[in-house]
Image (cartoon, rainbow, N blue to C red):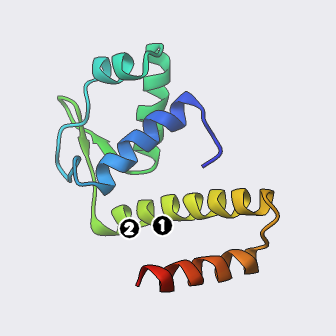
Amino acid sequence: MEDRSVNNEIRNFVAKNIINDFLKDGDKFYEKEFLINKFRVNPSYVDKTYQRLLDEDLIEAKSDYYYMKIDESKKNALIVEFANGYLNDFLKNMNSIGISNEGVYDFVSLRMRANG
């Protein structure tokens, strides 16, 4: 998962909390101050993340605050997004030590058989 921007760090924190069921549909979203303090960022970064989450339809604005807008298809899409990112990172690291993608497959197959 290459992009390490503050906006992506906050968004990925939220996404992982959705995947792990710490944030569920209808839950009140994190207070702005919580995210500012947790990530030690300027409030404008949190505002950008709020807008991104609104654009991705993961939160919705109501009259009093922001609330989670999650269903299984959104959660599954996040799982696939992270799994693909982790797999790409893994392949890139294995390639960097001279193991081809086919070699990675063979290596993982052997490892799986060894682990039962």
Q: Tell how many labels.
A: 2
* Mark sitting on residue 69: none
Q: From the top left corner, tell me how far across and down residue 95 is, in percent.
A: 77, 63
Residue at image point 24% right, 36% down: 29
Local packing at callout 1 (Cα closer than 10 Å; few below 14, some 14-19, many 20+) is few
Task: Name the residue carrying label 1.
Answer: 80
Q: From the viewer's perspective, is 54 left or right of 109?
A: left
**Badge 2: residue crowd in 10 Å (few <14, some 14–19, many ≥20):** few
Residues 61 and 87: in front is 87
Q: What is the quadrant of residue 77 in the picture?
A: bottom left
Distance from the alpha carbon under mark 1 to that under mark 2 = 6 Å
Element class at badge 2: helix
Write the residue at 79% across / 72% down.
Answer: 100
Q: Position of residue 4 (x, y in %)?
A: 60, 35
Does residue 109 appear left or right of residue 47 in this picture? right
Q: Are marks 1 and 2 in contact (CB under 8 Å)?
A: yes
Residue beneath the point at 64% across and 56% down: 89
Task: Name the residue type under label 1.
Answer: Val
Question: Which residue appears farthest toward the front when viewing the image?
Answer: 114
Task: Out of 100 and 13, give the one closest to the viewer.
Answer: 100
Say what secondary structure mark 1 lies in: helix
* Image quadrant where one finds the C terminus: bottom left
Query: Looking at the picture, which amino acid does disc 2 mark?
Result: Asn
Question: Which residue lies under the disc numbered 2?
Answer: 76
Give the residue at x 25% y 46%: 68
Note whether 74 is above or below 13 in the view shown.
Answer: below
For residue 1, above or below residue 33: below
- Taking depth in this image into account, of 110 and 95 the one nearest to the observer is 110
Horizontal and vertical percent position of residue 78? 43, 59
